[in-house]
Amino acid sequence: MKKHKSRKAKAPVVIYTYAKCSTCRDALAWLRAREIAFVERPIKDAPPSVVELQRMLVFQEGNLRRLFNTSGIEYRARGLATKLTRMPVSSAFRLLAANGMLVKRPFLLGDTFGLVGFDEARWSEAPL
């Protein structure tokens, strides 16, 4: 787990990243450029917890599919596109918490917001 300090006094946000993900690197550069304090966690080795996933689902307006890396190899190999619509949310959370490669990244979680994927416009609107 890496901590990045900034001059801002807000509590640091948590960002789950994958080292080989260029979008994650872009998101980290964006946070650093704005001096936003964050704690970086490796999504593959230490995926978000069920509690964090539950919080993110609320911020994603209940859209479970948004939590999944739908373009990932693991997602396609497991045939989750067809299974997800009938999968209980609790089962989806257990699956995501056990395999970080299934989680949409970057996965950014603050006290009052949660973002998946990196969209500079959306991130600029978040209360970071």
Image: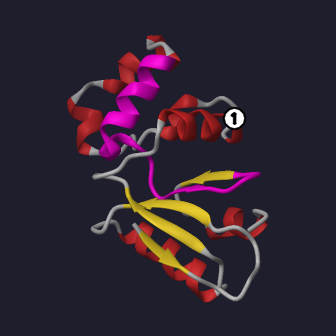
> Would you say residue 48 sits in the magenta stretch?
no
Q: Estimate the x, y position of residue 97 in percent, counting from the top left.
A: 39, 36
Can residue 95 be found in the magenta stretch? yes
Percent across and percent down for residue 3 are 49, 75
Left or right of 43? Residue 86 is right
Residue at 52 percent across and 80 percent down: it is 4
Q: Residue, x 59% and y 32% (percent of image)?
A: 54
Where does label 1 land, which residue?
58
Which quarter of the picture shows residue 58?
A: top right
Q: Which residues are magenta?
A: 90-113
**Which residue: 70% across, 67% down?**
11
**Which quadrant does the N terminus fall into?**
bottom left
User: Which residue lies most toward the left here?
Assistant: 77
Q: Left or right of 97: which side holds 56?
A: right
Q: Which three-letter amino acid code belongs to the residue tagged 1?
A: Val
The image quadrant that residue 69 belongs to is top left
- Say how many tags the image has: 1
